[in-house]
Amino acid sequence: MLRNRFSILPPHASHLIVALLVTVSWSVTAKESLVQVEYDVVYGEVEGQKLRLDVYRPSGPQKIRPAVILVHGGGWSGGDKKDFTKDEVSFYAKQGYVCFNINYRLATKDSNKYPAQLDDVQRAVRWIRSKAVQYGIDPKHIGAFGESAGGYLVALLGTRDTRDNSDPALAQYSSRVTCVVDLAGPKDFTTKLPVEPVDVESLVVNFLGKPRLDDPDSYREASPLFYVDKKTVPFLILHGTEDALVPLDQSVRFSEALHKAGVEASLIKLEGEGHEVKQQMTLVVNKSVEFFNRHLKPNPAEASIVPCVPSTRIYQHSSASKVFS
């Protein structure tokens, strides 16, 4: 999850990465109960494409719990919920959250262009609220965490109301989450994104389906920055100062817009980190949990943090495509 493995990149760009990648797995220092996992639950279907998520539930006494939704990156055309490992998602569940690790439609050359991904993640939030009794969650306390392209999508979950309300089964449920943690997501498509060392601009064109000059209004319409208002939920934004794929300025301007609107927002600049966070993963995960606890756990007695301890493993990728497996 918090490895941020060049997560803006789709599989077809993976030839650009052939290197040692340092990833982090998370263990819990205190004895914790097991986590119950339900894989590949269908939360919707669009034109024959089933939308699936995994549910991680803390074991122990049955009670109403807050929820956290996790949204993977991958340049909107790659990645998978499996990019968040079982151990990584379980870490949040062991903090007392029911976790929903979701997939969404991926953009191809000819299909699944924006707003398909927005519609899917908004549907996921509404479906989760509709299943609050079944999964024992508090529908008023749902947070979202996303990295890179997933950070972009969770930013929309905190700034926009439901775009497509055509499903009567979900019409009564809001798609806006309670709070958002955004790790290095782009927020403004009206400014050109880098073309080196990775052609991020081409990923955006593929995502939106047309060049910026052909339809500049659509680039603005798809940008979370321009939806910030007083209804926007609290944000924690984390971004590497040396990010060459999504410039730090994207998060700086977004944070400034949030403050101007009177919205609670914290921007943590990860000094020396690029788009792939290598050295400050403990900080990222612990700050995320602190933030979720503050906004999703009304009872302060339930807001204690089980510390996360990084266990570093080195992976040699003979084929860079394994980065996305």
Image (cartoon, rainbow, N blue to C red):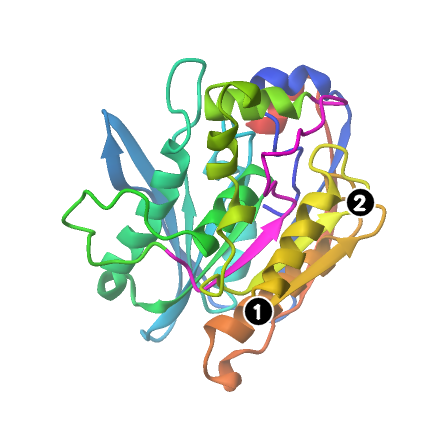
* Foreground pick, 126 / 96: 126
Q: Secondary structure at mark 2?
A: loop
Q: How many marks?
A: 2
Q: Is residue 271 magenta?
A: no
Q: Which residue is mark 1?
A: 262
Residue under the point 56% across and 20% down:
213
Q: Is residue 104 visible?
A: no
Q: Which residue is mark 2?
A: 273
Rendered location of residue 220, percent (x, y): 52, 37
> Furthest-left residue in view?
168
* Foreground pick, 167 / 64: 167
Q: Is residue 13 above or below residue 231?
A: above
Rendered location of residue 278, percent (x, y): 77, 44
Whichever of callouts 1 and 2 sits on the residue coming sooner in the sequence is: 1
Magenta: main secondary structure: loop
* Foreground pick, 124 / 230: 230
Rendered location of residue 102, percent (x, y): 41, 43
Amino acid carrying label 1: it is Gly
Residue under the point 24% across and 34% down:
45
Residue under the point 46% across and 38% down:
221
Q: Which residues are magenta?
A: 176-198
* Foreground pick, 75 / 260: 260
Q: Secondary structure at mark 1?
A: loop
Q: How packed is label 2: few (under 14 Cα within 10 Å), some, or many (20 or more)?
A: some
Rendered location of residue 265, percent (x, y): 62, 64
Amino acid carrying label 2: it is Glu
Q: CA distance from mark 1 to mark 2?
A: 29 Å
